[in-house]
Amino acid sequence: MLAIGRPDPSLRISQPHMALPAVTAAADPDPLRAALDAVYAAVVTYGEDHPALLTEVWSFCEERPVSPVPRFTP
């Protein structure tokens, strides 16, 4: 299904059902893919309120210390 323009307000989505992909995405063995897919699914679930979600995600990321990347030595 492809929609151009504003969504039809009569077509409501179930947010709990839209959130399920975030749970399965978080189980991906690749941590980066798991994080990105889970955040993407959460953004879709939040809909118009997604800026608030991204602000919260960003604030969490800023609080965490960055671990050094191991250098490759042949």
Image: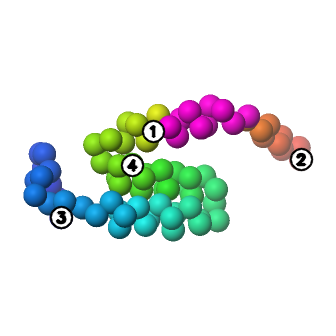
Which numbered marker is on residue 54? 1
The CA span between labels 2 and 4 is 41 Å
Q: Which residue is mark 3?
A: 1
Badge 3 crowding class, 10 Å Cα cut-off, few under 14, some 14 to 19, many 20 or more, is few
* Percent of width and height locating residue 13: 24, 61
SS assignment at label 4: helix
The CA span between labels 4 and 1 is 8 Å
Nearer to us of marks 3 and 4 is 4
SS assignment at label 2: loop
In the image, residue 16 above or below residue 5: below
Q: Circles 3 and 1: CB distance less than 8 Å?
A: no
- Amino acid carrying label 2: it is Pro
Please state the extent of the stretch shown in magenta in the rendering.
Answer: 56-65
Lower sequence index among marks 3 and 4 = 3
Residue shown at the point (19%, 60%) measured from the top left: 12
SS assignment at label 1: helix
**Is residue 57 inside the magenta stretch?**
yes
